[in-house]
Amino acid sequence: MDITAGDGRRLHTPRGVYPGSFDPPTHGHLDVIERAANTFAELIVAVVVNPQKREPMFTLEEREAMIQECVSHLPNVRVEHFRGLLADYVKKKHADVIVKGLRVVSDFESEMSTALMNRSLSNVDTMFLMSDQKYSFVSSSIVKEVFFLGGDVAALVPEPVMRLMAAKRATLRSST
């Protein structure tokens, strides 16, 4: 993304892509989004279908809509979804950096090889943001597990997400 300076020079403004399945989006995800939005002129939150994960709780469109509602206060953040290789997506979007959130050391171990592969395929580097320590234990998987076992996850997810989770649980209960 380029802008024109007051003196007519063209200036490059960095664009980041924050990919994830976001099933469901958590406060940890929003923490990374807000911090990345402060770093980049434009941030694309890219909701992806991850074939390595089991059946999602929410559709792609539901996840995209939840995130959009949660980031509506951030004018430089755009929410999209995509299927396929992240390397192809970041090239298509002319992204400068892939943003990934890290909670614990094991996240880095698993993300490093993916970052290197993405760089070899797209020539785009990955920037890792450490999560705020208060979210270091929060994952979408554990939120879903605790929620469906009857636990209270309201402190771990934004209100729009909690609202849709509750509706989803009510629908599941009424169909059984």
Image (cartoon, rainbow, N blue to C red):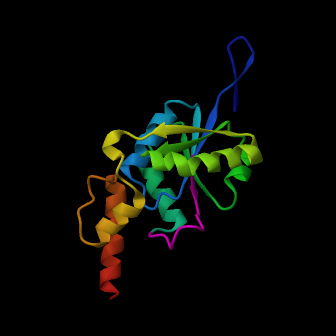
Q: Is residue 54 magenta?
A: yes
Quadrant (top left, top right, bottom left, bottom right) of the N terminus: top right
Task: Say whether residue 121 is visible.
Answer: yes
Count of all numbered marks drawn on residues in the image: 0
Q: Position of residue 109 (x, y in %)?
A: 54, 48
Seen in the picture, residue 124 relative to 10 is either above or below; the reply is below
The single residue placed furthest to the bottom in the displayed view is 176
The quadrant of the image that shows the C terminus is bottom left
- Asked if residue 69 lies left or right of residue 19, the reply is left
* Residue nearest the viewer, comparing 91 with 128: 128
Residue for point 70% across, 57% down:
85
Q: Nearer the viewer, residue 101 or 10?
A: 101
| Residue range (magenta) | 45-57
Looking at the image, the residue that sits furthest to the top is: 7
Picture residue at 63% right of the left edge, 36% below the top = 15
**Left or right: residue 170 compared with residue 79:** left
- Quick check: 23 left or right of 174? right
Name the spot of residue 170 as percent of width and height, x first: 30, 76
Q: Is residue 49 magenta?
A: yes
Main secondary-structure element of the magenta-colored stretch = loop
Observer able to see residue 79: no
At horizontal 71% and vertical 50% (from top left) the residue drawn is: 87
Q: For the point 36% across and 62% down, which residue is it?
A: 142
Location of residue 98 with respect to 63 vertically, above or below? above
Q: Is residue 74 shown above or below 151?
A: above
Whole-percent x, y for residue 38 in the image: 49, 30
Q: Position of residue 159 (x, y in %)?
A: 31, 54
**Quadrant of the rendered image containing residue 66:** bottom left
Q: Nearer the viewer, residue 2 or 39?
A: 39
